[in-house]
């Protein structure tokens, strides 16, 4: 299957700092990438849909000024959590969509802890 | 009512048993059906992908889609402790951007 990587896998930061998470499709081009958030023992919560070269589409309740998404190329999307606070601590997962059908391939996730 | 319903479990079975995981859905327009496996603290991994109705088999895994009943299943034969994970069903409409996920079923295979 297609491979999606995320970096970093884990980050610990102080409250008020910004954190950038990278998502890369390694062996295919992804016109669409997705960012999810997952709390313990819960399913995935879609935060935003990112299309290459255009602005991201955010889900209701997700602050676009806090969670900045950039999709500059067909293989790279970044999520920046600005002025992070402890309540932003979570598991962030990206996915990339193959053109055919609705299949999404997921990255390994990034665990963010804000102190 | 949720668009996709999945029993969260937990489900615990002995090694070697046949496992049946299921999801029901309400949107008859769904055409693409997926099963993902997620280990603790990892991203979901695509296991099976089915378009429209029918069965699909891959090794020990079989996916079934019954569109008339709006019901999908994943069967795991000869279950192994390494199959212990959370299993998520997901589905979407042709041309749609988003996947709709079930809640996920936590499965434990006991040696």
Image (spheres, helix red, strand yellow):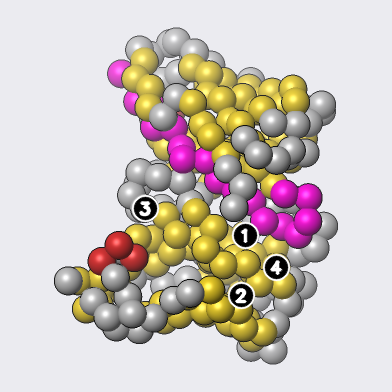
Which residue is drawn at the image coordinates 57% and 39% (left, top)? A4
Q: Is residue B15 left or right of residue B61?
A: left
Give the chain letter at badge 2: B
Which residue is drawn at the image coordinates 60% and 79% (left, top)? B56
Label disc, if present, on residue B39 of the rendered structure: 3
Whether residue A114 is visible here, answered yes or no, is: no
Would you name the residue on which mark 1 appears?
A: B100
Q: Nearer the viewer, residue A56 or B38?
A: B38
Element type at mark 1: strand
Element type at mark 3: loop
Q: Nearer the viewer, residue B5 or B104?
A: B104
Disc 3 crowd rating (10 Å Cα; few below 14, some 14-19, many 20+) is some
- In whole angstroms, how far apart are the C-alphas of marks 1 and 2? 10 Å
Would you name the residue on which mark 4 appears?
A: B32
Have a look at marks 1 and 2 and say if they share a chain: yes
Which residue is drawn at the image coordinates 45% and 10% (left, top)? A17
Q: Nearer the viewer, mark 2 or mark 3?
A: 3
Instruction: Specify which label sits upstream in the sequence, 4 or 1.
Output: 4
Give the chain letter at badge 4: B
Q: Nearer the viewer, residue B89 or A107?
A: A107
Q: Nearer the viewer, mark 4 or mark 1?
A: 4
Mark 1–mark 2 CB contact (< 8 Å): yes
Mark 4–mark 1 CB contact (< 8 Å): no
- In whole angstroms, how far apart are the C-alphas of marks 3 and 1? 20 Å
Have a look at marks 3 and 4 and say if they share a chain: yes
Give the chain letter at badge 3: B
Q: Is residue A108 above or below residue A102?
A: above
């Amino acid at each position: 299957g297609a491979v999606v990587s995320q970096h970093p896998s884990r980050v610990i930061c102080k409250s008020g700092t910004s954190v950038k998470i990278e998502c890369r499709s390694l062996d295919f081009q992804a016109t669409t990438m997705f960012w999810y958030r997952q709390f313990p023992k819960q399913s995935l919560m879609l935060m935003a849909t990112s299309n290459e070269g255009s602005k991201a589409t955010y889900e209701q309740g997700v602050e676009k000024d806090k969670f900045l998404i950039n999709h500059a190329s067909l293989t790279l999307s970044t999520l920046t959590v600005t002025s992070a606070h402890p309540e932003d601590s979570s598991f962030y997962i990206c996915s990339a969509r193959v053109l055919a059908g609705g299949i999404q391939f997921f990255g390994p996730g990034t665990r963010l802890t804000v102190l | 009512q949720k668009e996709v319903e999945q029993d969260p479990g937990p489900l615990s079975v002995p090694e070697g048993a046949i496992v049946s995981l299921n999801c029901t859905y309400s949107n008859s327009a769904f055409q693409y059906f997926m099963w993902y496996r997620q280990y603790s603290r990892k991203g979901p991994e695509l296991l099976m992908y089915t378009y429209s109705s029918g069965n699909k088999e891959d090794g020990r895994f079989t996916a079934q889609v019954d569109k008339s009943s709006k019901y999908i299943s994943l069967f795991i034969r000869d279950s192994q402790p390494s199959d212990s994970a959370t299993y998520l069903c997901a589905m979407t409409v042709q041309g749609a951007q988003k996947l709709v996920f079930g809640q996920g079923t936590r499965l434990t295979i006991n040696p």
